[in-house]
Image (spheres, coloured by chain):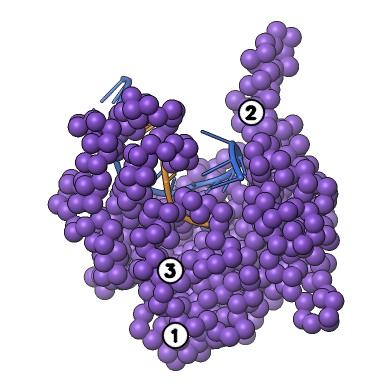
Chain colours: A purple, B orange, C blue
DNA sequence: CGCCCACGCGCC
DNA sequence: AAAAGGCGCGTGGGCG
């Protein structure tokens, strides 16, 4: 068991503190070891090399780990007090009186300051100069001159140990510890992802832009293709001065031309067969590419053939990550052909197939739904079980169940699923009812949903008042259902995020143990339920093995009571979460080549058809590695 | 001029 | 097939 070592800054000096008795009521520290700043990486490396290892307890991974990485040291594990505090303070697993007693008020230093997240945009120029970030340890320059506030690391560590100890149910306490470990490991990975970046070939991207948009225009000028399409739109609509980028103007002209639309959104336009629709959709697709991922984007976010962004653990209330800078988590499929491994290196692209319904099945202990997923394609499993008639219906119906759909095809299918899988649907319905009533729901490992806002409660109060009108009631009901859909999804999305974090933590640890003779494999991208590892070709097979083992391990950590369902013919049981694994040169090769191409096919026709030629440089997948549909 | 919002659309 | 959950971000257009 690794021992805790607290890293903190006092009077401008770095102190390493080893608590005497972890969990004691006063974790009175032994005499601190004072470390000169330049010596820190060496000291950390020495402690990391201890047989049992250490767990670094610090106020924020984003404040300390970048400098260590720059100095060539990556810690194995940590306890990120800022992230852990946020979870513990809100978790219904911790008795409410303990939470309010331990953290009675928001503390701006801990609860509001996220300035030490830093900026990917600030990382690259430093690297280009050959500098390190080391001098900024403990005083990260956020670019706007803001300095990190003082945080009492020793006191906060003790508070969190006490809060954990107050969780009387050993199972819930265990899960909460898992969550804090996964969250902290995620923070280490997030900093490493920013530092290492995603391999990105400028030349390849430039070729894509040139092909789809024309040559790079001067700033402020429309690319040639867009200018041509804008001209066609103006001609068709007989609106010579129309700016198709102006939504109000465009809407006026569409209506003047007889299109019965109330917005300019894609799905509404598709309902019309007016000749302008095809041209307009092509324009919108390409305009989006130009503004979101065009030349300016590349100049800003791609340096030295690496795309770098900030990843923000728990940036989403459910526990998912968000990103800042470059739109990292919405990297469009159109440009993934520019994500290219270095020479002699490969990308291992891994997708956790149909993660959310599988997680729901596991949480609910719904053996029928588990069995439906156990043969590979869960959606096909629903068809084979007779629950629904087609795979497409299985998919939209299941998404409807997770999101709270009540109307349309999706909404119609939900009752069928409820009959076939009462336990799974019962779990999300229960979460929805709790939310509608203003209650708090909690993920499998213990992350709780936020309380309702004052405005929400006010709306409910107004509807139950003696003088409540019909409008009050309908507004309150609408807000209540809205919050119910949020809490319904929260438990599944949040638990899926916990599984994914645990998975990534396992992958990260495995990668650290691989030989580095040809270079060290590293995480390159993490997208909710998808991982990309950049690895020397020689290690690709081992990386594939690592991601698959880590997936099995994550399932065993979260759901130790679930044994994979045995197969009738006695072969190896399928894992709870099968992976789609591809070893490739470019990220484009992962674009759902077949069965699971999402149902939104119609939306992709315009730009999608144009980029097909960018796909097709596939390296053969490792035999036996693809386990999904 | 900067700030904030709605819109629309990319990703899961 | 389609008005359902979570995000980031660029744009235009309104405001002070």
Residue A599 visible in this rendered orientation of the protein: yes
- Numbered label attached to residue A536: 1
> Mark 1 or mark 2: which comes first in sequence?
2
Q: Distance between the residues labelled 1 and 3?
A: 19 Å
Tell me the residue at 66%/78% (across/down): A549
Query: Which chain does the numbered disc 3 sit on?
Result: A
Element type where label 2 sits in the image:
helix
Q: Position of residue B4 (x, y in %)?
A: 39, 31
Q: Distance between the residues labelled 1 and 2?
A: 52 Å
- Numbered label attached to residue A588: 3
Query: Which chain does the numbered disc 1 sit on?
Result: A
Tell me the mark number nearer the camera, choosing from 3 and 2: 3
Element type where label 3 sits in the image:
helix
Does label 3 lie on the same chain as label 1? yes
- Classify residue A211 as left or right of residue A5: left
| Quarter of image, res C14 | top left
Q: How far apart are marks 3 and 2 (CA)?
A: 41 Å
Tell me the residue at 17%/53% (across/down): A217
Tell me the mark number nearer the camera, choosing from 1 and 3: 3
Tell me the residue at 58%/63% (across/down): A596
Residue A92 visible in this rendered orientation of the protein: no
- Numbered label attached to residue A479: 2
Front residue of C4/A75: it is C4
| Quarter of image, res A343 | bottom left
Q: Are marks 3 and 2 in contact (CB under 8 Å)?
A: no
Which quarter of the rendering shows the N terminus of chain A?
bottom right
């Amino acid at each position: 068991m690794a021992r805790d070592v607290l890293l903190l800054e006092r009077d401008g000096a770095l102190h390493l503190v080893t608590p005497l008795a972890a969990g004691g009521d006063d974790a009175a520290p032994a005499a601190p070891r004072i470390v000169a700043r330049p010596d820190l990486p060496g000291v950390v490396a020495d402690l990391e090399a201890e047989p049992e290892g250490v767990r670094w307890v610090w106020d924020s991974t984003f404040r300390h780990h970048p400098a260590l990485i720059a100095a060539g040291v990556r810690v194995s594990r940590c306890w990120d007090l800022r992230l852990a505090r946020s979870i513990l303070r809100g978790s219904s697993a911790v008795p409410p009186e303990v939470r309010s007693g331990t953290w009675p008020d928001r503390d701006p230093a801990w609860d509001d300051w996220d300035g030490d997240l830093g900026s990917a945009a600030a990382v690259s120029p430093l690297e280009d100069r050959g500098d390190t970030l080391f001098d900024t340890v403990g005083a990260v320059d956020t670019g706007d001159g803001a300095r990190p506030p003082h945080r009492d690391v020793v006191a906060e560590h003790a508070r969190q140990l006490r809060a954990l100890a107050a969780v009387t149910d050993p199972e819930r306490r265990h899960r909460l510890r898992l969550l804090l470990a996964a969250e902290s490991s995620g923070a280490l990975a997030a900093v490493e992802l920013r530092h290492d970046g995603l391999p990105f070939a400028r030349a390849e991207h430039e070729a894509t832009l040139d092909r789809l948009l024309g040559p790079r225009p001067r700033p402020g000028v429309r690319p040639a293709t867009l200018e041509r399409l804008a001209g066609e739109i103006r001609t068709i609509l007989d609106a010579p001065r129309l700016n198709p980028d102006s939504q109000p103007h465009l809407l006026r002209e569409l209506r003047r031309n007889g299109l019965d639309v109330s917005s300019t959104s894609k799905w509404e336009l598709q309902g019309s067969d007016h000749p302008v629709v095809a041209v307009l959709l092509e324009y919108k697709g390409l305009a989006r590419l130009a503004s979101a991922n065009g030349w300016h984007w590349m100049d800003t976010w791609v340096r030295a053939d690496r795309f770098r962004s900030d990843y923000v653990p728990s940036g989403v209330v459910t526990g998912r990550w968000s990103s800042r800078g470059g739109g990292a988590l919405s990297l469009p499929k159109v440009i993934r052909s520019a994500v290219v491994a270095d020479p002699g290196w490969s990308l291992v692209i891994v997708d956790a197939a149909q993660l959310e319904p599988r997680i729901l099945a596991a949480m609910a202990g719904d053996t029928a739904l588990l069995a439906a997923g156990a043969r590979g394609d869960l959606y096909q499993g629903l068809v084979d079980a007779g629950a629904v008639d087609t795979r497409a219906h299985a998919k939209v119906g299941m998404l409807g169940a997770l999101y709270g759909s009540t109307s349309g095809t999706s909404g119609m299918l939900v009752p069928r699923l409820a009959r076939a899988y009462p336990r799974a649907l019962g779990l999300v319905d229960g979460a929805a009812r709790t939310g509608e009533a203003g209650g708090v729901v909690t993920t499998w490992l213990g992350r709780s949903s936020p309380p309702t806002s004052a405005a929400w409660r006010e709306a409910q109060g107004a509807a139950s008042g003696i003088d409540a009108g019909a409008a009050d009631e309908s507004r309150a009901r609408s807000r209540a259902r809205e919050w119910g859909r949020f809490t319904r999804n929260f438990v599944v999305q949040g638990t899926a995020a916990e599984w994914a974090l645990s998975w990534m933590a396992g992958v990260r640890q495995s990668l650290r143990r691989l030989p580095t003779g040809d270079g060290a494999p590293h995480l390159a991208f993490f997208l909710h339920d998808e991982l990309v590892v950049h690895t020397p070709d020689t290690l690709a097979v081992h990386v594939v093995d690592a991601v698959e083992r880590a997936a099995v391990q994550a399932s065993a950590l979260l759901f130790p009571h679930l044994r994979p369902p045995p197969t009738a013919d006695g072969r190896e049981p399928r894992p709870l979460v099968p992976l789609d694994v591809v070893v490739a040169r470019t990220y484009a090769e992962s674009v759902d080549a077949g069965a699971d191409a999402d149902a939104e096919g119609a939306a992709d026709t315009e730009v999608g058809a144009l980029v097909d030629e960018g796909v097709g440089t596939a390296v053969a997948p490792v035999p036996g590695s693809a386990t999904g549909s």
